[in-house]
Image (cartoon, helix red, strand yellow):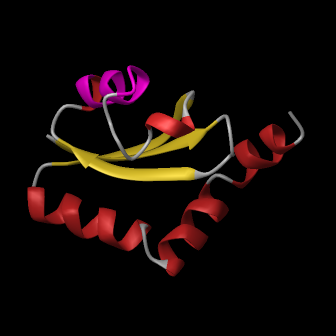
Amino acid sequence: MFYVYVLRSETDSGFYIGYTRNLRARIKQHDSKKSFATAHRSPLKLIYYEAYLNQADALGRERYLKSGAGRRFLKAQLRNYLAKHESN
């Protein structure tokens, strides 16, 4: 399986969108600050993921979610979660 995932920084409320073959191991890397891209933004919370059977499909989806339209999709998809956690 191939995974596209979204982490939310509890420090700055920003999103990190990534791709991996092993979601649990990748989350552990982020949590232990072994990822340069997110080390300064911890703690992080997994708020969304999608699973794919094909690597090219997963990479295409990651690319889309990083685009303006993809970010708008995520904000619409997660609107209830985000509304609840904006006030915290």
The reply to whether residue 3 is in sight is: no
The residue depicted at 44 percent of the width and 35 percent of the height is 39
Count of numbered circles in the view: 0
Q: Quadrant of the N terminus?
A: top left
Q: From the image, which quarter does the C terminus lie in?
A: top right
At horizontal 12% and vertical 49% (from top left) the residue drawn is: 53
* Image coords of residue 16 (percent x, y): 47, 50
Q: Residue 55, image x and y in percent?
A: 10, 56
Q: In the figure, residue 43 lies in which quadrant?
A: top right
Q: Horizontally, is 36 left or right of 54 in the view? A: right
Q: Does residue 15 show up?
A: yes
Q: Residue at x 73, y 47 (%)?
A: 82
Furthest-right residue in this view: 87
Which image quadrant is residue 10 in? Answer: top right
Taking the spot 19% from the left edge, 31% from the top edge, the residue there is 22
* Residue 40 falls within the magenta-colored stretch: no
Image vertical order of residue 58 relative to residue 40, above or below: below
Residue 67 is situated, as x and y percent measured from the top left of the image, at 44, 76
Figure check: 26 above or below 68? above
Q: Is residue 49 left or right of residue 13?
A: left
Compared to 30, does 81 lie above or below? Answer: below
In the foreground, 8 or 32: 32
31 inside magenta stretch: yes
Chief secondary structure of the magenta portion: helix
Q: Which residues are magenta?
A: 25-33
Is 44 positioned to the left or the right of 24 in the image?
Answer: right
Whole-percent x, y for residue 40 in the image = 51, 38
